[in-house]
Structure formats: structure tokens, C-alpha cells
Image: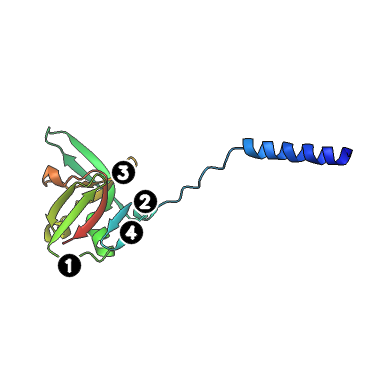
Amino acid sequence: MKKSILFTSLFILITLLAACSQTPEAVVTETAVLTVGSEEFSLSELEAYETVSADYTNKDGETSTFEGVALTDILQDANLIDGDTLVFTASDGYEAELPLEEALSCANCIVAFDDDILRMVMPDMSSKLQVKDVIKISVK
């Protein structure tokens, strides 16, 4: 009788402890942050590229320097060199278009690391092409 009370007490104690314990946090795995054509690039893959800098002057005349990856390198690695128009898509659905030929000839256009997002830095081009939080580059 004493053994059954002891086992029952232990069972209840273990059950209560299990119910009160915190569930482990989910392990966050790195997902693709930029889709270029049919290729997906993680942040670590983008950071492995040679980093270049580009200056951009906004409409108020303020110049900022950004660090990132040359757009031409990413386009070539994703084999996105055929087509008419390059489309940059932001996480909020905003899209900007640029003739592909212009993008491929732009030596100082970059996909910049801007805190925890990516942005297009397209010096000497329309402010509409300076897409913040870019998640996709495609051709049409």
C-alpha cells in the first residue's frame, strides 16, 4: 500500500513538473532572403561574395555610402542575363523595372546590406529603383 502511494505521488509530481516546464524555443534556420530568377540566396551566401561600396545621393542631396554585392555578379551567378526588363520586388509588393541591358552595364549598382534587410543601391538612377527590403529580382 505504501509503495502504491509512493509511486502515485511520484507520478503526480513528474506530471506536474512536465506540465510546468517551458517548451524549448524553435530553432530558427536561415531561409532564402533573395530570389534571383530561379536561384535563392541566403544572407550568408550573399555575404560570401566580394563586398563593394556604392554612394547614393537622395532627392535632398544627402549622400550615403552602402556596402553590398555587385548586382552584375548576382545576375551572372543566377544566369539571369537574358531578357528585356529586370524587375525588383520588395517585401511589401512594390516593384520597380529597369532594362536588363542597363543593369548589366551598371558597374556600381549593388544589392546592399542595410541592417537586417537588403536594398537596391542604383547610383545615378531614378529614386524609384532604390528598392528597400528587396526580396526578389526577376526578368520579364
* Disc 1 from disc 2: Cα separation: 25 Å
Residue at the far front in the pictured view? 1
Q: What residue type is labelled 4?
A: Glu
* Disc 1 from disc 3: Cα separation: 27 Å
Mark 4: few/some/many CA within 10 Å (<14, 14-19, 20+): some
Looking at the picture, tell me which residue is in the foreground, 57 or 93: 93
Number of marks present in the image shown: 4
Q: Quarter-wise, where is residue 72 in the image?
A: bottom left
Q: Which of marks 1 and 3 is nearer the N terminus?
A: 1
Q: Earlier in the sequence, mark 3 or mark 2?
A: 2
> Viewed as shown, does residue 120 lie left or right of 8?
left
Q: Name the residue under label 1.
A: 82
The residue sitting at 16% across, 33% down in the picture is: 62
> Viewed as shown, does residue 29 lie left or right of 56?
right
Name the element at disc 1.
loop
Contact between marks 1 and 2 (CB within 8 A): the answer is no
Looking at the picture, tell me which residue is in the foreground, 38 or 100: 38
